[in-house]
Amino acid sequence: MHKGVGIIGAGPGVSALHLPTLDRMTELFRVVHIADAGSGRAEALAGRTDAAWSRGMDDLLADPTVEIVAICSSPEHHARQVLAAVAAGKRAILCEKPLALTHEDASAVIEACRESGTALVVGTNHLFDPAWGRARHHIARQNASVRAISITVSLPPNGRYHDVVTESLPGAAPARPAPDWRDVDFASAVVRQLVLGLGIHDLPLLRDLAPRIDRVVFARPVAPIGYCIGLISGDVIIRLTAVMVPEGADALWRFSVSTARDLIDVEFPPPFVHDGSARARVRHVDGGVSEYSSIPEDGYLAEWKALATARAGVEAVEYDELLADAQYAIDLADAAAEAVREGWTS
């Protein structure tokens, strides 16, 4: 029997991703309530599913038909809203990434969910993407050491997702003047926010292969909006590059891993698009190439399935892993922001 889902947030991610995904899973879920923060968008979205709607989260959390809460608001609200959902007795939560923006909030959220037995899934769709599972299995099976990792993101200013990242950056929204990258406070803050708002898609994958951050060698903002970060994890060299370009080719989102034997490329679809899973390609040391084509199931569908199995008790919730992912992302964001500052004075 399906479970009633209440969604906190009514932005493009809910409209373009979560509602279409849940429409494919009616045997498990039914959207019964959508709440916004006063934008008025919840009413229109609720009409698509014949759901209730409200402003703020109080009515939604008090709704007895809401058994599962999806937190799809701005990142600065995530931790507070997870804690409120747990306090309201909701025992299954899907929280969009990032889980929290500070170590204190991340610890508080995990402690509350662990103590209450709340099933918690963080909506890191790349981690749940079947193509990443295939690539990770290949790396483990080869038992070859990872030498280098490169994550390259290039996004055109598509309204479906570009505004989501830029709208909260001072001076960076389309209707405002271009950001002043000469201001070190602004530059370091934007790099930190982009790591936690954009880079966060891949950081659990990165932590899986390079579990510690030994040193952020450099971090620079990239105009018009983006970053380039270099870091070292043990013997692994890592480069993270992201840029939002005003014009250019289609979106590129590539996670590349060089091992002692192979080069593995995973190309993810752009955010806010349902286009099946990622595609993976392995270039072997002998010159051969293995291709893993896209399949209809994507990471969004898989993360909701993971919540269903966790809610049913079929799979244990890995609270320690969720906390470690959150801490890793915060540590990297803080170190990158500090490296931006150091670059200004060096």
Image (cartoon, rainbow, N blue to C red):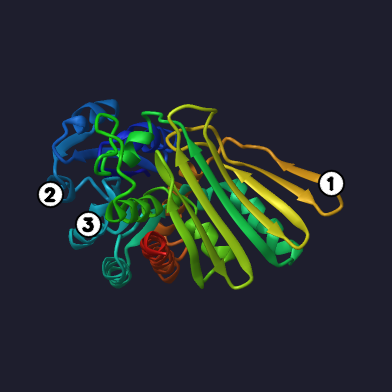
- Classify mark 1: residues with Cα within 10 Å, few (<14), some (14-19) or many (20+): few
What is the CA distance from the residue labelled 3 to the residue labelled 2?
9 Å
Confirm or deny contact between disc 2 and disc 1 (CB under 8 A): no
Q: Residue at x 28, y 69 (%)?
A: 116
Going from N to C along the chain, the mark reached first, 3 or 1, is 3
Q: Quadrant of the C terminus?
A: bottom left
**Rendered location of residue 211, percent (x, y):** 53, 69
**Rendered location of residue 342, percent (x, y):** 39, 65
Q: Residue at x 62, y 66 (%)?
A: 236
Q: Residue at x 42, y 58 (%)?
A: 310
Kind of residue sitting beneath label 3 = Ala
Kind of residue sitting beneath label 2 = Asp
The residue tagged 3 is 85
The answer to whether residue 234 is above or below residue 270 is below
The one of 322 and 178 positioned closer to us in this rendering: 178
The residue tagged 1 is 288
Task: Inspect this view and state whether residue 213 appears.
Answer: no
Kind of residue sitting beneath label 1 = Gly
**Rendered location of residue 33, percent (x, y):** 22, 39
- Classify mark 3: residues with Cα within 10 Å, few (<14), some (14-19) or many (20+): many
The residue tagged 2 is 58
Q: Nearer the viewer, mark 2 or mark 1?
A: 1
Find numbered disc 3 in the image and state the secondary structure of the residue it sits on: helix
Q: Residue at x 26, y 66 (%)?
A: 105
- Classify mark 2: residues with Cα within 10 Å, few (<14), some (14-19) or many (20+): few
What is the CA distance from the residue labelled 3 to the residue labelled 1?
51 Å
Confirm or deny contact between disc 3 and disc 1 (CB under 8 A): no
Left or right of 324? Residue 169 is left
Q: Quadrant of the N terminus?
A: top left
The one of 271 and 130 positioned closer to us in this rendering: 271
